[in-house]
Amino acid sequence: MRGATQLGKMGEAGGEIEDKEEKARRLGVSSLWVVGALAVAALLLLLAARAERHLPPARDAPPDDFSGFRAHRYLVNLTAVGPRVAGSYENEVVAVKWILNTLREIADQASPHNRLELDVHTASGAFPLSFLDGMNNVYRDVQSVVARASGAGGRRARTALLLNCHFDTVPDSPGASDDGAGCAVLLETLRALLAAPRPLRHDVIALLNGAEENILQASHAFVTTHRWAKDVRAFINLEACGSGGREVLFQAGPQDPWILEVYAGVAPHPFASSLAQELFQSGLIPADTDFRIFRDFGGLSGVDLAWSSNGFVYHTRLDTAARVPPAALQHTGDNVLALVQGMLRHPALESAVERSALPAYCDVLGLVVVALRPGAALLAAAAALLVLLLRLLLSAADAQRHRERYLVFCCFTALSYNVSCICNVMHYCIRT
């Protein structure tokens, strides 16, 4: 009897040792999961940080290619005028004269296959604006410089692509990024298009508007009164809420998904997010761009590109040309020139296509753009949710035997979701 009792105690002790060994093994496996998950997260953060800071080197490119150095010279010359408030002598006379002279030089450098028409547009008008608490925006004699590039020797194309920027500034700011850099990119893009040894397939209308900071007046004047506005089929708007860095495609549509699909297919340095679009259009950010005017008053679809790095210089005297490196202009110019060329080749610019809803879109580490039409995006979200629920159910059923794994999985899932949301909100909301 005594021997049986001792054997029983020995068996219990052996079972306890086995249980402890099993727990230690499980804890080791759980630790490996944690270490692996943290390593993957750290690697992704490093890749994202590299993509955020990586800019292509500026180059002295051939005449029909974009040069960040040439664009930067345009920027330096424009900002040398100083602050250019709408209605001021600097904006209405000095800046307009410099832009016209620059456009004439660009026209002189054009290949025999292309030509450039110039027009100084002045208009008055009014429109309701649902910005902040809403207002009626009334303007008189606002001024813009408009240029139309087309193939030489033939009839003017029936449809055109619009490129827009603004050269006016807020008081006391030289406006290098907002929006002198946009003007510099537009001018260099136009120069490269005209220098190409082949005629343009469609016309390109360049609008350098002189009254955006007064809340979008000159773009409204163009789209509602200019004789060329009726020919515009789509647009690209260049803006800024920071200085330097990569430009982000933060608005697209509202329809014509082909524009976004062209960007996804041709942009060499893509950076785009429909999350940024949702945040911007939700009203959380008290700002607006000419995108709204072209969309609401012109019935047009397009894309909105803006720099967002170094937002502390936005609308201040610190917004100087020295803070906009040629590499940042090269990054934007490469994307804009490729996008313009891709849109000019697309058949939708010539003839109407089905105007469907905009896809959900984002870039992957600045390498590719993933764009999913609404149906595909819904299916992808449902599939991801289903996989997550199944995994949670299976893990919950096995929780008693693998509690550590289950807790690690749940914690890591919640952590990754929250970190992703916080990073996106900080990047696209706080920085702007």
Image (cartoon, rainbow, N blue to C red):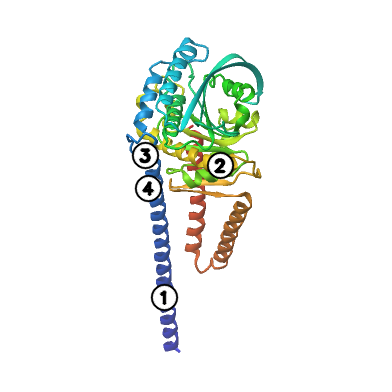
Residue appearing at x 56%, y 42% in the figure: 259
Q: Mark 1 or mark 2: which is in front?
A: 2
Amino acid found under the numbered disc labelled 3: Leu
Which one is in front, 412 or 320? 320
Q: Position of residue 131 (x, y in %)?
A: 62, 25
Real-space Cα separation, disc 1 to disc 3, in angstroms: 57 Å
Name which of mark 1 and mark 3 comes first in the sequence.
1
SS class, disc 2:
helix
Residue 90, image quadrant: top left
Q: Which residue is mark 3?
A: 55
The reply to whether residue 296 is visible in this rendering is yes
- CB within 8 Å, label 2 to label 3: no
Name which of mark 3 and mark 4 comes first in the sequence.
4
Q: Which residue is mark 2?
A: 259
Crowd rating for badge 1 (residues with CA inside 10 Å; few <14, some 14–19, many 20+): few
- CB within 8 Å, label 3 to label 4: no
Q: Which residue is mark 4?
A: 46
Name which of mark 1 and mark 2 comes first in the sequence.
1
Crowd rating for badge 4 (residues with CA inside 10 Å; few <14, some 14–19, many 20+): few
- CB within 8 Å, label 1 to label 4: no
Name which of mark 1 and mark 4 comes first in the sequence.
1
SS class, disc 4:
helix
Rendered position, 358 above or below 229: below
Residue appearing at x 47%, y 12% in the figure: 93
Q: Position of residue 319 (x, y in %)?
A: 41, 23
Q: Which residue is mark 1?
A: 18
Real-space Cα separation, disc 2 to disc 3, in angstroms: 24 Å
